[in-house]
Image (tube, rainbow, N blue to C red):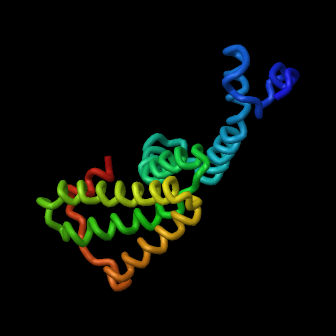
Amino acid sequence: MSASSAHRGDAFAPVSSGSPATRVLRALLGTAPIFVVLVGLLVWITIENPNFTNPNVFLIFLRRAAPLMILAAGQLFVILSGEFDLSVGALITLVVIVAARVTDGDPSRTWPVILLLIAIGALVGLANGLITTKLAVPSFITTLGMLLILDGWTSWWTGGTPRGDLPDNFRQWGRL
């Protein structure tokens, strides 16, 4: 970074250098395109569906988008560390199938199954992390392999036809 780029508010300069005001401005300039796209999308959705600005409709939208927002927040940390995780979708498929088949509509199995699902996610994450860091396999290859393993195992276990039923007390957590 040259001395001139530190003083002109260069969006690509490190955020940690310069005065506090310069750092804030530089951080905002670096993220401004994201907010412009977000505002543009919200305006377009509102034009297409004027009811979108109704608070109840917007809350329904947020509830439906919440699982994707949670996944995106998790992926943010992976991407910021310079890696990539392709296995998330296969992991979600696996835990949904495990939850439905193991609980099979029995409300008393909800909490043990939730602990099992957390353990499955942690083990997959640990395997991906160890293979990437200890064996120095690129995260793209590691998680692509994990995606294929999880999808293959899920298809084998279900025979290609998901079965099972989630009890209502399991579903209520997703509706909060």
State the residue at coordinates (37%, 76%): 154
Quadrant of the frame with the N terminus: top right
**Residue 94 to residue 74: above or below:** below
Quadrant in the rendering for residue 21: top right
| Left/right of residue 135 with respect to residue 170 in the rendered view | right
Name the residue furthest left. Answer: 108
State the residue at coordinates (49%, 42%): 54
Give coordinates of residue 149: x percent, y percent: 44, 73
**Residue 162 to residue 64: above or below:** below
State the residue at coordinates (48%, 48%): 74
**Residue 78 to residue 153: above or below:** above
Give coordinates of residue 117: x percent, y percent: 29, 59
18 or 169: nearer the eye?
18
Name the residue furthest bottom. Answer: 159
138 or 61: nearer the eye?
138
Give coordinates of residue 69: x percent, y percent: 48, 48
State the residue at coordinates (34%, 64%): 95
* Number of numbered callouts drawn: 0
Name the residue furthest right. Answer: 4
